[in-house]
């Protein structure tokens, strides 16, 4: 109807977080199977960055933490968004935005 695209997101299938049976990412209605949950998060993050798709408002703080703390990737756009919770977590790890 509005012909909008969907931002990359992760789908994990399993009974609990300790028992993940399948990991996927979705990019614009296309489902991709990945080997592990970590690989699914990595590919979703890199898809955001490669496609120039901004993080959704609801998950921006979480994605910035994953991007900066776990994958040590920084972009010119990181300084445009300064969430207090992200700044606190980064400072706890001796890092800054």
Image (cartoon, rainbow, N blue to C red):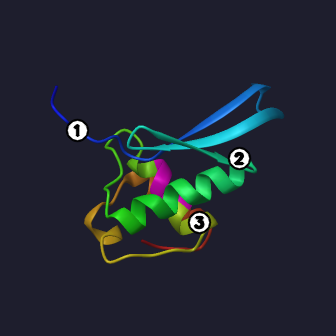
Point out the tag, 1 or 2, that comes first from the N-terminus. 1
Point out the tag, 3 or 1, that comes first from the N-terminus. 1
| Spot occupied by residue 50 in the image (x, y as percentages of width and height) | 40, 68
Q: Quadrant of residue 80?
A: bottom left
Q: Is residue 40 magenta?
A: no
Q: Is residue 24 above or below residue 48?
A: above
Magenta stretch in the rendered image: 62-66
Q: Which of 85 and 42 lies nearest the eye of the viewer? A: 42
* Quadrant location, the N terminus: top left
Mark 3, residue position: 69
Identified at 36% across, 51% down, the residue is 55
User: Whole-Å distance between the Cαs marked 3 and 1?
Assistant: 31 Å
- Which mark's residue is nearer the viewer, 3 or 2? 2
Report the magenta stretch's main SS: helix
| Spot occupied by residue 66 in the image (x, y as percentages of width and height) | 56, 58
Mark 1, residue position: 4
User: Whole-Å distance between the Cαs marked 3 and 2?
Assistant: 17 Å
Q: Is residue 78 above or below residue 12?
A: below
Identified at 42% across, 43% down, the residue is 59
């Amino acid at each position: 109807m509005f012909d909008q695209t969907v931002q990359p997101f992760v789908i994990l299938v399993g009974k609990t977080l300790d028992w993940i049976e399948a990991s996927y990412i979705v990019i614009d209605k296309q489902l991709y199977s990945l080997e592990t949950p970590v690989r699914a998060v990595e590919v979703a993050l890199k898809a955001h960055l490669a496609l120039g798709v901004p993080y959704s408002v609801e998950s921006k703080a979480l994605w910035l933490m994953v991007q900066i703390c776990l994958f040590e990737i920084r972009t010119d756009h990181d300084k445009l968004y300064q969430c207090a919770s992200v700044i606190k977590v980064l400072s706890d790890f001796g890092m800054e935005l």
